C-alpha cells in the first residue's frame, strides 16, 4: 500500500485526495454481520482470497457499508442474510451475467455490481475483475 495518501486529522482514514469529502463515523464491522453468519463466512473468504491472490487489504467499516481499500477505496460490500453484495470500479464495462448492473461513473471508470452467494463465486474470473479494481487499471 502506498504511503503518499492524505490522512484525515480527525478520523485518521487515508485518501488519495487532500481534504477528501467523507464521514468520520466508524461502525463496528461485527454490526454488519449481526444475525448473518453465512455472509460473514463469505466475507472472510473474500478477504482471504484478495490478500492471497491480489495484495494487502485494508478494511474500513462505515454505517453504510464495508469499504475494501488498496491504495484507494476500490469496493463497497453489503452483508445480506444469505450473500454479500458488492460494487467495484474498473476502467472498462464488464459484460457478464454475473454483473447485476454497471454504469459509467465518470470519464473512464465504470461501477459494477455483483453478488457473492457461495465461496465458489470467488473464482478466477471474479478475482481478475477485483484485481483490476484493486490496481485501478485494466490489465
Image (cartoon, rainbow, N blue to C red):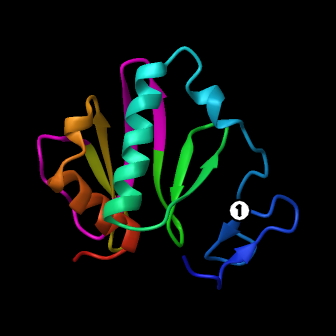
Percent position (x, y) of residue 49?
A: 34, 52
Pointer 1: what residue?
A: 21
Q: Which residue is outermost to the top? A: 35
Rendering coords of residue 10 (x, y %)? 88, 61
Q: Position of residue 60 (x, y in %)?
A: 63, 51
| Front-lying residue, 106 or 101 | 101
Residue extending furthest toward the right: 10
Judge from the rendering whether residue 92 lies leftward or rightward of residue 71; answer left or right. Answer: left
Horizontal and vertical percent for residue 23? 74, 51
Q: Is residue 27 above or below residue 132?
A: above
Closer to us: 110 or 71: 71
Looking at the rendering, the stretch of residues picked out in magenta corresponds to 77-100
Q: Quadrant of the N terminus?
A: bottom right
Q: Is residue 95 visible?
A: yes
Residue at image point 43% right, 18% down: 81
Element on which disc 1 rests: loop
Whether residue 90 can be seen here? no
In depth, the one of 5 and 113 nearer the eye is 5
Q: Quadrant of residue 131?
A: bottom left
Residue 65 shown left or right of residue 116 in the figure? right
Amino acid at each position: 500500500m502506498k504511503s503518499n495518501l492524505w490522512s484525515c486529522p480527525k478520523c485518521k482514514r487515508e485518501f488519495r485526495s487532500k481534504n477528501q469529502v467523507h464521514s468520520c463515523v466508524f461502525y463496528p464491522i461485527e454490526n454488519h454481520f449481526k444475525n448473518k453468519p453465512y455472509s460473514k463466512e463469505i466475507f472472510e473468504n473474500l478477504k482471504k482470497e484478495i490478500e492471497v491472490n491480489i495484495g494487502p487489504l485494508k478494511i474500513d467499516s462505515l454505517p453504510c457499508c464495508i469499504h475494501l481499500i488498496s491504495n484507494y477505496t476500490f469496493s463497497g460490500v453489503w452483508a445480506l442474510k444469505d450473500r454479500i453484495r458488492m460494487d467495484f470500479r474498473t476502467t472498462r464495462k464488464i459484460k457478464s451475467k454475473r454483473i447485476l448492473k454497471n454504469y459509467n461513473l465518470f470519464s473512464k471508470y465504470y461501477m459494477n455490481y455483483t453478488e457473492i452467494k457461495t465461496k465458489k463465486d470467488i473464482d478466477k474470473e471474479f478475482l481478475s475483475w477485483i484485481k483490476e479494481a484493486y490496481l485501478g487499471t485494466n490489465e
